Image: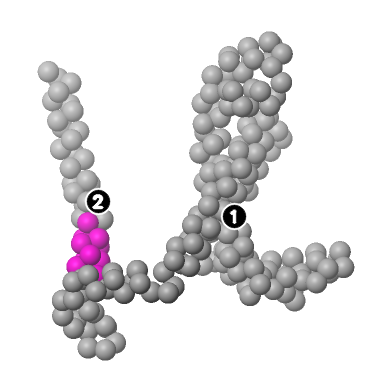
Amino acid sequence: MATQHARSAARLMMAPAVILLLGWMLVPLTMTLYFSFKRYLPLRGGDLGWIGFENYARFVSSSAFWPSVQATLMVVGGVLVITVCLGILLALLLDQPMWGQGVVRILVIAPFFVMPTVSALVWKNMFMDPVNGLFAHLWKFFGATPVEWRSDASLTSIIMIVSWQWLPFATLILLTAIQSLDSEQLEAAEMDGAPPLARFGYII
């Protein structure tokens, strides 16, 4: 009985936060859906009336719709592959005992705290600039012509920037998952002579 009262009290205490969070999410969503059925041009008269699904029909029938979908899927897929693969490698590396482990972890997760606009400007000016960027100097050092990232490889550059920003998040999740594994299973597999790749594939 006391447990039920405690649970009821906890729900009542959480109710204001849950209601505020629902309002915070549902009000913008409702307004977005409402305006998607209207012809609303803020710089040319504002609200010009209800037009139903015309905005959706124009959006889907646009010549830029499917190329945009394709580009979005390429960015999402590329970022997922890079963050998961490199995140696993970094998580395995950070799980090993090393000197200055705390400092290394802070350095690894640092990009996650950089604003997207700032990270884009840092990559654009410090790394991808075809004249003064770090990549341009590396290309010249090896006798190659620097890449014009913003014009010749714009999609690749976006994938690199977004992957760099979200890699720490994937690393932290995967590191937490690895550290929550049962160490006895890993030790037993190692004592039974299981090679590292087999331990990784079947246990980790």
Q: Which residues are magenta?
A: 26-36
* Count of number-bearing discs: 2
Q: Residue 154: which quarter of the image?
A: bottom right
Q: Residue at x 57, y 47 (%)?
A: 81
Pick the front one: 72 or 7 = 72
Residue type (three-letter) at the residue carrying disc 1:
Trp
Which residue corresponds to mark 1? 164
Q: Residue at x 80, y 66 (%)?
A: 139
The correct choice, above or below, for 75 with respect to 45 in the image is above
Residue type (three-letter) at the residue carrying disc 2:
Leu
Q: Nearer the viewer, mark 2 or mark 1?
A: 1
Q: Secondary structure at mark 1?
A: helix
Q: Which percent across, then down, holds residue 159?
A: 58, 59
Q: Which percent across, then down, holds residue 143?
A: 87, 68
Q: Which percent across, then down, holds residue 56?
A: 28, 69
First of labels 2, 1 by sequence position:
2
Q: Residues within 10 Å of mark 2 (few under 14, many from 20)?
A: few
The correct choice, above or below, for 190 with respect to 44 in the image is above
Would you say residue 59 is visible in this rendering? yes
Would you say residue 103 is visible in this rendering? no
Q: Is residue 75 magenta?
A: no
Q: Residues within 10 Å of mark 1 (few under 14, many from 20)?
A: some
Q: Which percent across, then down, holds residue 82?
A: 60, 49
Looking at the rendering, in which quadrant would you find the C terminus? top right
Q: Which mark is residue 21?
A: 2
Q: Residue at x 64, y 34 (%)?
A: 92
